[in-house]
Amino acid sequence: MRQRSRTRLVVLQVLVVSMMVTLLGRLLVVQVHEGGGYVKAAAANRTREILTPATRGLVLDSRGRALARNRTALTVSIDRAALVRASDEGRGLIGRLATILQRPARELWGRTRLCGAPDAPRRPACWNGSPAAAIPLAENADPAMALQIMERREAFPGVLTALAAVRVYPAPLGANAAHELGYLGSDLVGRSGLEQAYDVDLRGTGGVRTLAVDRRGAVTGTVTETRPRPGNHLVTTLDAAVQAAAERELSAAVQRARHVGDVNKGFRRFTADSGAVVVMDVHTGGIVAMASWPTYDPNVWVGGISTADYRAITSKANDFPNQSRAFQGQFAPGSTFKAISVPAAVDAGYSLDGSYPCPAGYPIGGTVKSNYESEAFGTISMRRALEVSCDTVFYKLAYETWLRQGGLHPPAGRTDPFTAMAQGFGLGRRTGVDLPGEASGRIADRAWKAARWTRTKAASCAKAATGYPEVARTDPARASFLRRLARENCADGWAYRGGDAANFAIGQGDTLVTPLQLARVYAAVANGGTLVTPHLGKAIVTPAGKLVRAIEPRAAGRVPTSAETLTWLRGALRSVTEHGTARAPFARAGFPIDQVPVAAKTGTAEVFGKQSTSWFASFAPADKPQYAVVLMVTQGGTGSGTAGPSVAGLYRTLFGVNGRSVDLVRADPPGGHPVTALPVVRGDGSVEAP
Amino acid sequence: MSLDVQAAVVRRESDRALRRLDWALLPAVLALCLLGGVLVTSAGRNGALHEGADPQALLKHHLANVAIGLVLATVASLFDHRLLRAYAPAVYLVSILALVAVLSPVGTTVNGSHSWIVLPAGFSLQPSELAKVALVVGLAMLLGEQRDGEDDPRHVDVVVALAVAGLPLGLVLLQPDLGTALVLAALVVGVVAVSGAPLRWLLGMLGGAALTAFVAVRVHLLAPYQLDRFTAFLDPRADPRGAGYNVRQSLIATGSGGWFGQGLFHGAQTQGGFVPEQRTDFIFTVAGEELGLAGAAAVVVLLGVVLWRAGRIAMAAGDLFGRLLATGILCWFAFQTFENVGMTLGIMPVTGVPLPFVSYGGSSMFANLLAVGLLQNVHRRRG
């Protein structure tokens, strides 16, 4: 054999030796050098963490009735990993599930998409939770449906059916409180209302169970387990009985308005498209009841809201039932604002004992601003001006003050007593209520007008030049009015005119308040000047009944007026129900204001292009105030006609009024005052009234 | 030659044969076979217990395969040299027919490769394993014939040899079984090189291999999954659920073994069934996880002993035929070992080839032991 063959064989053997050495070297690297990392990876490979959600705490009313609780229900959920593993991304599986669960396949499919992913539907129809958690597809499933899935496990890989706690809003005594309670996302995290505000307290701490699994994911044992710690209960200041009454009365006010013809709009019936009511403890700011109309059943959120339901509660056609008018709606307050204008007038140098002319109209800047229905009362006292709600008295006070301030061009450093008083009473900023999404309202003062003018100047000037041809085709008068307005806004929209100051004093113009803000204004008048912070949360209590923390009332400040002025104001507002515009609702219903005196102010706020807003702001008892009640209906007519009777009805509940007799024991809550003690939570889950 | 004459030859030579056996090769092979039995048992044990099957069944089957293989090896080692040359064309032809049959509806697809013929009584045959033996014998015959002590192979001999090798290689690629095709290619290059063929043939073959690889990628001759599997070893994390899954799981199992392993039957990855194809292609991971570096290195060293003996036998062979036979087997075992352990350790692409003597599987065991028999045969007739 030739030498060449030998040589090549030797080369070959050297090659083989180097290959073996390479393998041994690599083995050393993998097993010893990098071994630690693989040991860790192996542990992760072999175990799976199952999150056991904690039982969510209850939301209780002040007397221990559950407004939100949990119910055990059959849930069907899916492990996202099973979808990822499937060849068709699990579309077939979701289709089969949809047939059994009788839900649209597209909706279930969307529910499994991670929010923010390119193919995910918009919130809340997508999955907002952890990608590792099982996604609930049907909470409250029919046992027959779940059985069909359980019997054919192999056809539904990754689909879990289990008993799980599901949130329910049982509406005790009919108290729905949808906007206040809020709702949970499909991942059981509070997304709105109290459920969101107190989520950390209610949620508790989830448990983690580490399971040993094999490659197929089959569980072979439990490695470690930390038990979930159930969430704490939230005791609220709400009272289910009052809440139910408030919702009933608000709905009644809306229905009442819808049966009344609007004198100013050719006797067309009032639209009454929305409304709100707030019942507040005047001393603490605790919300005893709060409701908004239209409303919805909060249980539609449970188990993930369906697309149809979501559209229904967020659509314009239904007047946005998901928005709370009580703390998210902003409206011109109308004459209820005069409770602020009186102390402002005192600051401006006017006497509460003086006499003021109340003509039918008051000329300002070339136009005559008239009283409601152009009534004239001659020269009257300030008290009478409140009783009859004489606008021209307040026009004069505000206009003269405006002139003294320097009119259109006041010297720097002067503060307008009217806008300053509005600020002092907490308008134009959030009250700080413990509910997310509160609106701040606005004070349409000089600064606000200037800012708006800068913002809208360009658009106004364009419209002033072109006019409104599209409006002119159907309504030439309106078109020419709009054009005049645009021209004015273009030229000197920045100007805080005498007319603006006059409007401000009677709660008209661009100033907006939330019903919650207005309730706080009346509470401040009632309690002697403390500007409270409205709140619904009262205490956090463990499931065993131990107090975690009391949510103490916080004062937001004091209103900048004297005790004497407030005392005078309480007396004047009381005579509004005895002799003035607020008399009719109580007198007609035979409400015993001699036993339960009520201080109130009506409001009938004009809204450009719409029917007037009906307001009724009040507190009672006028001599020893406990509750402030504000009720309003947009496009609802007069304050005394629409809102007034409903407020009288609410006081019936609050003070145990039956006919002409008053029985405070039968009042809700009993005693004719807000509940101070906490309900007793027992370890066994039962709750007793304080 | 009739059967009884053949039997007489075997009897006559058997006593002389024992004395001339390579006594280092045999223990190494037997040790690997037994170790393989233990590892295969560990890999299949939990799955069997889970399904209520006999956990020892795999071990029994493996040992039966070894026993049959040893009988084949004995016959191969005692076979007359010249007889083997005479039978080479027939062996080659049978293997080609089997490779064609496996592509026909007779064959069965396992794991995407159409490479099995299922026989009655629970047996199945993988003709590509037989093709390795056939090709070794065939090439040795073509390139080692008639020229003992004469010139190196002529160009025409090399062309014929490459044609003979090309046919089974192409058929194996059609299955498609890339791993076996690569083993065959390594074997061909090794045998042609040691045959003393002109250098330009060697360079040509290497260049051709590179060109083939390039073209295969560029014109999408490879299915996307093949390419993915090929490239996955470069970064197993890129697609841990897909192409990189095998490598990732294999590395986790091997890597968590440490110096001395987690103990036989106590490897969590192995017992949890995380490593795919563990009793066949990824059997090495069981050694890595449960026996640690000590056990895994022992497997590599034992295979090294086999390769060392194969090399020695090739060097000492009495004629070119014997040398080429041993060289072919050396290249086959060496490449298959490197490929199998290399893919387990993430330095070679994942192509399904078994670890010689250790992996579970009848055809591969028969072919390997048959090859050991041939090595002994060459050893007996050393100069």
Image (tube, coloured by chain):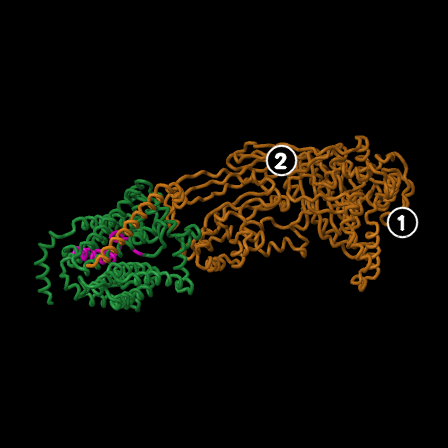
Classify residue A210 by image quadrant.
top left
- When the figure is inspected, residue A105 is found, relative to residue A590, above or below; the finding is below
Residue designated by label 2: A538
**Residue A368 shows which numbered tag?**
1
Q: Main secondary structure of the magenta part?
A: helix
Chain in orange, by letter, is A
Task: For marks 1 and 2, give the CA distance.
Answer: 50 Å
Residue A469 magenta-highlighted? no
Residue B374 magenta-highlighted? yes
The image quadrant where one finds the N terminus of chain B is: bottom left
Q: Position of residue B308 (x, y in %)?
A: 23, 50
As helix, strand or loop, the secondary structure at mark 2 comes to: strand
Q: For the residues carrying marks 1 and 2, which lies nearer the camera in this image?
A: 1
Any part of residue B98 in sight: no
Q: Please give the range of residues in magenta.
A: B353-376
As helix, strand or loop, the secondary structure at mark 1 comes to: strand
Q: Position of residue A60 (x, y in %)?
A: 59, 39
Q: Say whether disc 1 or disc 2 marks the residue closer to the N-terminus.
A: 1
- The reply, left or right, for residue A446 in relation to residue B306 is right
The chain letter for the residue carrying disc 1 is A
